[in-house]
Image: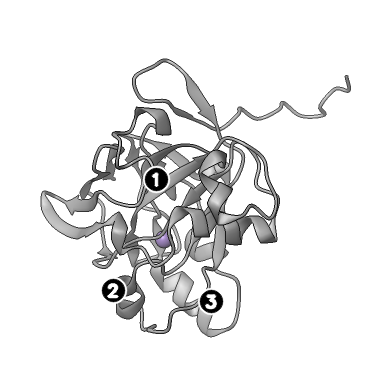
Amino acid sequence: MSNYVIASHPQAAIPVAGSGDQFPVRRIFCVGRNYGEHAKEMGFSEKEPPFFFTKPADAIAENGATIPYPPLTSDLHHEIEMVIAIGRDGANIPAEQAMEHIWGAGVGIDFTRRDQQIAHREKGRPWCWGKAFDNSAPMSSLQPLSALPDGQKTLDNGQIWLRVNGKMRQQADLSDMIWNVRDIIAFCSQAVTLKAGDLIMTGTPAGVGAVTAGDVLEGGVENIGEIKVTLS
Ligand code: MN
């Protein structure tokens, strides 16, 4: 075994609900505009194939964290999203086999520097500075699919919500997603080989908006998980 020339970094990981176990995180893929009402509020109306962007695994912040308001923005937005955790590698996965590749699910916040995202989008530049920054992906613990109630194991239904300082800002149902988790995996695995440890953030419902230092964000997906973070 060769020596690393600098100290190797810690493995990004998320706790598994109800156990001391951890899920080691490899990459984070995120789906854009996957709820019709959110696409509309962002100025888009056509149904289009899902598109993806990424965040680094070390953008994860743990549930309960206090997060400093990030640099380079004065318009930090919350996006509550169901997160799926890939447990088995695969490329070109057919939608009908996609559930076999999902280990479990959780809930996360896709924090977005909306001013940066839109400025870069208008110039035809990448979204990275709008989406991929420190602490931009707070995550709940993960539930194994096997722990979910019958009727929800396909991740097709369940309330999703986000409150800021106790006030409801986003509220929808997973059944409102334009592309379900099986379609998302089919599309994503056409572009890259999905690997065990990858996470996919499945898009946010309508109601995104700005938050500021001092705000407390609390969100969840019914039976899947809850997340709370405070901005400082
Ligand atoms: Mn998002």
The residue under label 2 is 37
The residue under label 3 is 120
What numbered label is drawn on residue 154?
A: 1
Instruction: Answer whether residue 144 is visible to the viewer in this image.
Output: no
- Which amino acid lies under the numbered mark 3 shown in the image of this protein? His
- Which amino acid lies under the numbered mark 1 shown in the image of this protein? Thr
N-terminal-most mark, 1 or 2: 2
Q: Residue furthest right?
A: 2
Instruction: Answer whether residue 208 is visible to the viewer in this image.
Output: yes
N-terminal-most mark, 3 or 2: 2
Q: Residues within 10 Å of mark 3 (few under 14, many from 20)?
A: some
Q: Judging from the image, what secondary structure is the residue with disc 2 in?
A: helix
Q: Nearer the viewer, mark 1 or mark 2?
A: 1
Query: Is the Cβ of the residue at disc 1 closer than 8 Å to that at disc 2?
Result: no
Residue 5 drawn at (x, y percent): 82, 29
Q: Residues within 10 Å of mark 2 (few under 14, many from 20)?
A: some
N-terminal-most mark, 3 or 1: 3
Residue 12 drawn at (x, y percent): 55, 33
Q: Is residue 7 above or below residue 200?
A: above
Q: Is mark 2 within 8 Å of ligand 1?
A: no
Q: CA distance from mark 3 to mark 1?
A: 36 Å
Q: CA distance from mark 1 to mark 2?
A: 23 Å
Q: Residue furthest top?
A: 20
